[in-house]
């Protein structure tokens, strides 16, 4: 845990003294659709709580790589972040997407600040080590600078984080945005009443993957175990849900999964899937 | 002038209460040379004062535009920032260059945060209006958010500003880095003892433009008037020097012009040209 110098900080352990905090991940497909993205940002801007937005990259980086003639390396079906790809994702994620999101939020009277993990030492990571596969410049997270986040949040500044971290030795690293959202949410859980929201193009966790209306509105650990037991959870959702329950274990109050266009309803529990201890 | 909410802030008018501040502009040619840039950043990181770095763009944006097949529009010898060029400079300046500078400073134990003018509403600008020429997405500065800068500087965070501003209506704007440096320096002059440093590839202001060793070490307004009168100032330097004297008029303690590789000597007055009231 961080030590705190800021005058508004609590003593460590005084949980939730700073009120509600939304940590919202916005998925790639929305990033690629300007109209949907701007509607989402208007909604995000209008929510009065303290808030952090983590964005993915969408298809812009792939398109730019094609335009620049940089081939995407794939090994065993996995994309490898080589030096040229790292340059592209730094430009697109921390530059183009991050700054346009911030400018749109400012236009909607939400004072936002866009950061990569290098900025203010926000997210320290290390280059991924793997026995047989070199992922290239991909980062696994070691530490989140909660002091910086608290300073900004206490000044009612919304933080917009790009999925780029650093290793404190001069390397920038491409890092999964879902993981960044989870690490930020759990790091801040001792300080705020944190809701972690994964917003994307789906309505929520579905009981029937073919039926967008079969959203499971509420889920706790025992119900999740029961659904897994009956093999009623789509295999692709299991890692996400395991992560959601891990976040609850680490102090996040609730995890909400649902449609980006319904952000306010997700926050209110009126849409999507809410995962909590209850 | 800004109003201050931060607990460490002075009451407005208590000039220079917060100590020395360096506002350093690093020119384009250094940005393009990784070895020189990294040496400069090591030197910048080692200076114990509060500090702000403003970087230009270098030739990376032009190279990327070529690689992407985006033609640079020139009208009457001036580069026009069209929509595609704005996208490129946002990626290169606020993304690639800004984040790599921040990562290098972090590696040198300098806690830096990279910002565009949109971030935290740092620099509000408007799209340039010109009677006969449309410069495109180019910004002229209206306001600098000194409250945000003071909050970060008071936490010993060095600010790294990219030459991109915003209009608070959702537009990002390409903005001259020299001008940003000057506007930041003058906005903070009531709060700090500000030295504004323009560092580039030259030794300083030269008496003889052919002789790199003819640096004018010190210059005040009357000496400048005398040199201009005798036509001993290279025409290309006159706008820069006029701006330097304007900054002095607005409260900046001194303006120093000189070689990026000698940053520490520039700060100490042992190299370059120091422009002050003395």
Image (cartoon, coloured by chain):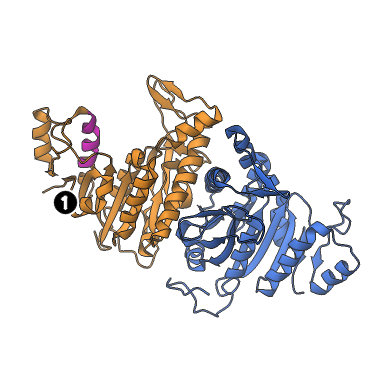
Chain colours: A orange, B blue
Label 1: element kind: loop
Residue at image point 21% right, 52% down: A265
Residue A269 locus on image (x, y percent): 17, 51
Task: Please give the residue where the numbered disc 1 appears in the rendered image.
Answer: A270
Secondary structure mostly seen in magenta is helix
Left or right of A251: which side holds B86? right
Residue in the foreground of this view, choosing between A82 and A15: A82
Residue furthest front as drawn: B132
Which quadrant holds residue B140? bottom right
Disc 1: host chain: A
Left or right of B204: which side holds A46? left
Q: Is residue A43 above or below residue A179?
A: below
* Residue A244 within the magenta-colored segment of the rendering: yes
Residue B193 locus on image (x, y percent): 62, 71
Left or right of A271: which side holds B45? right
Task: Give the magenta range.
Answer: A236-245
């Amino acid at each position: 845990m961080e030590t705190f110098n800021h005058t508004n900080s609590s003593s460590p352990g005084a949980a939730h003294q700073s009120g509600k905090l939304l940590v919202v991940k916005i998925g790639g497909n929305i990033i690629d659709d300007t109209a949907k993205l701007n509607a989402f940002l208007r909604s995000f801007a209008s929510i009065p709580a303290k808030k952090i937005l983590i964005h993915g990259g969408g298809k812009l980086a792939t398109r730019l790589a094609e335009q620049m003639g940089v081939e995407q390396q794939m090994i065993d079906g996995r994309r490898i972040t080589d030096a040229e790809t790292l340059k592209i994702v730094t430009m697109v994620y921390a530059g183009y997407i991050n700054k346009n999101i911030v400018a749109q939020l400012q236009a909607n009277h939400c004072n936002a600040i866009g950061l990569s993990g290098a900025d203010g030492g926000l997210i320290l990571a290390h280059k991924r080590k793997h026995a047989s596969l070199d992922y290239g410049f991909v980062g696994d997270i070691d530490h989140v600078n909660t002091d910086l986040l608290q300073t900004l949040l206490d000044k009612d500044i919304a933080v917009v984080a790009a999925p780029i971290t650093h290793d404190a030795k001069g390397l920038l690293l491409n890092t999964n945005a879902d993981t960044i959202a989870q690490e930020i949410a759990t790091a801040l859980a001792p300080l705020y009443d944190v809701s972690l929201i994964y917003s994307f193009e789906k309505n929520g966790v579905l009981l029937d993957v073919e039926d967008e209306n079969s959203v499971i509105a509420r889920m706790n650990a025992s119900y999740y175990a029961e659904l897994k037991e009956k093999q009623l959870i789509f295999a692709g959702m299991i890692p996400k849900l395991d992560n959601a329950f891990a976040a609850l274990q680490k102090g996040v109050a609730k995890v909400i999964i649902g449609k980006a266009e319904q952000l306010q309803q997700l926050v209110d529990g009126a849409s999507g899937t809410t995962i909590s201890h209850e």
